[in-house]
Image (cartoon, rainbow, N blue to C red):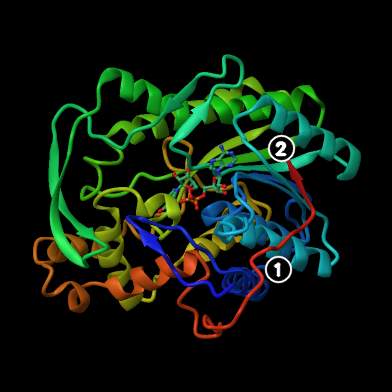
């Protein structure tokens, strides 16, 4: 099969296995060059491990610290007519490269919100991993959650709270700057968004691992969050999704208190804006990302998911001098510190009011945004021949639920 990108709205419905493998290789190369500390995690569970921040965390744990990793994700292998998803190919590549490096790697392809997936993960940890988990990374981004007991399906929404919000955004199909209006969510929509993207499921994972005796004494758990800036607050931090992220903050405090005797350190890790499948779907964010990328690249501050994950592990969680992580006043780990620097944000604000369809490519890093978006799916890499026939059927050692 010859595989080219097929972009539909904010998603690409095809993915390239060779390009995805190259992406994973690249993340491994960056990690090996940067990380290298004697002490790090030994057995790591990554929930949401196939793309974005979760994949970068898995790569960092395995190739930066030699950790055994168990990855959970929800992806699709290829069918007769369609290639698999990027997360499927990424995970296949990770599995192959980790095993080649002599590292334990296991993956579960299933719904992380379900009790069955938790049970299978615990079984694998008990039977195969040779000891308890000392780091749990929670990196799910999902528009929908099937509640584990009732089976009820709950949907999240990306809406404002109170007032509609109109702002510039980019229509990535037309490469045009447009005005979008985001409507306020109802009370029910706010509640549902918290149910899907808040901390309830994270807490269920920790509880299940602890009850099964597979959570190490003094373990660490980090759930990823986004706070952003004034430009994105109305749609994000002050919107329905922000309520879910605030619930995550509360959950971190609750978990640390509940499992104090076990010495659990539960953190929210506030990460910077990056291009992922999840962030491309949020109005306003792709235009903001195009601007902030340009500014941060000019200042030599640019980071993608792998640089952020490397920095989180190396400079924050597992510091060479053994000191505990620095947190903000809410107890959160702030990896968005460079993005939120005054000089970066002032430059962003100045640019924000000037950007138009005509000057989009010159004034922002829209080209970089488009390239990174296609690369998420294994496309737009110079080292891959996209006209070559490729086998889309890539299988690997995965527990299929
Ligand atoms: N992208 C950003 O700019 C950004 C910035 C800061 C924080 N974050 C946060 O990072 C976290 C991860 O987001 P991302 O941007 O890396 O997203 P992503 O879309 O790249 O990754 C989502 C992951 O969740 C998995 N997943 C989704 N539904 C699942 C389910 N039901 N069962 C099992 N796995 C499932 C996917 O397979 C994938 O591995 C989110 O909490 C997000 O808010 C993202």
Which label's residue is closer to the chain start, 1 or 2?
1
Q: Which mark identifies residue 263?
A: none
Using a 10 Å C-alpha cutoff, classify the residue at mark 1 as few (fewer than 14 neighbours), some (14 to 19) or many (20 or more): some
Element under label 2? Answer: loop
Q: Residue at x 29, y 54 (%)?
A: 285
Element under label 1? Answer: loop
Residue 304 placed where, x, y %?
Answer: 47, 65
Q: Is residue 40 above or below residue 380?
A: above
- Disc 1 Cβ-to-ligand 1 distance below 8 Å: no
Marks 1/2 in contact by CB < 8 Å: the verdict is no
Please identify the quarter of the rendering in which residue 321 is found: bottom right
- The answer to whether residue 143 is left or right of residue 239 is right
**Residue tagged by mark 2?**
401
Q: Is residue 7 above or below residue 285?
A: below
Please identify the quarter of the rendering in which residue 341 is found: bottom left
**Quarter of the N terminus within the rendering:** bottom right
The alpha-carbon separation of the residues under discs 1 and 2 comes to: 35 Å
- The answer to whether residue 203 is left or right of residue 104 is left
Res 17 visible = yes
Residue that lies at the very extreme toward the front in this rendered image: 80
**Residue tagged by mark 1?**
36
Q: Looking at the image, which is closer to me, 258 or 56?
A: 56
Please identify the quarter of the rendering in which residue 115 is found: top right
Residue 363 placed where, x, y %?
Answer: 18, 75
Residue 279 placed where, x, y %?
Answer: 38, 52
């Amino acid at each position: 099969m010859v595989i080219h990108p097929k972009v539909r709205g904010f998603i690409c419905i095809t993915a390239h296995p060779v390009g995805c493998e190259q992406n994973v290789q690249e993340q491994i190369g960056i990690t090996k060059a940067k990380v290298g500390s004697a002490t790090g995690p030994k057995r790591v569970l990554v929930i949401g491990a196939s793309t974005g921040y979760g994949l970068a965390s898995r790569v960092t744990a395995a190739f930066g610290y030699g950790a055994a990793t168990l990855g959970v994700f929800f992806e699709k292998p290829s069918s007769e007519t369609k290639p698999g998803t990027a997360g499927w190919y990424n995970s296949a590549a990770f599995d192959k490269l980790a095993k080649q490096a002599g590292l334990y790697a296991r993956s579960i392809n299933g719904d992380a919100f379900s009790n069955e997936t938790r049970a299978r993960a615990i079984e694998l940890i008990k039977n195969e991993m040779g000891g308890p988990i000392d780091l749990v990374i929670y990196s799910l981004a999902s528009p929908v959650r099937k509640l584990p007991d009732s089976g009820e399906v709950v949907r999240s929404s990306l809406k404002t709270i109170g007032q509609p919000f109109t702002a510039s955004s980019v229509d990535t199909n037309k490469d045009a700057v447009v005005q979008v209006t985001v409507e306020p969510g109802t009370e029910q929509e706010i509640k549902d968004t918290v149910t899907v993207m808040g901390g309830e499921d994270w807490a269920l994972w920790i509880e299940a691992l602890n009850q099964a005796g597979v959570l190490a004494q003094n373990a660490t758990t980090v759930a990823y969050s986004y706070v952003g800036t004034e430009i994105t607050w109305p749609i994000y931090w002050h919107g329905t999704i922000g309520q879910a992220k605030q619930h995550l903050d509360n959950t971190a405090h609750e978990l640390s208190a509940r499992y104090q005797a076990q010495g659990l350190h539960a953190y929210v890790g506030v990460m910077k804006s990056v291009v992922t499948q999840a962030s491309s779907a949020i109005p306003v964010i792709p235009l903001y990302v195009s601007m902030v990328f340009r500014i941060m690249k000019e200042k030599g501050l640019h980071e993608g998911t792998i640089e952020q994950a490397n920095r989180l592990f190396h400079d924050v969680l597992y510091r060479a001098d053994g000191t505990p992580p620095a947190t903000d006043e809410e107890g959160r780990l702030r990896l968005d510190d460079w993005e939120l620097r005054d000089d970066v944000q002032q430059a962003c604000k100045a640019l924000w009011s000037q950007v138009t369809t005509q000057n989009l490519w010159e004034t922002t890093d829209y080209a970089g945004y488009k390239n990174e978006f296609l690369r998420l799916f294994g496309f737009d890499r110079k080292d891959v021949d996209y006209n070559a026939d490729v086998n889309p059927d890539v299988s690997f050692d995965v527990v299929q639920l």
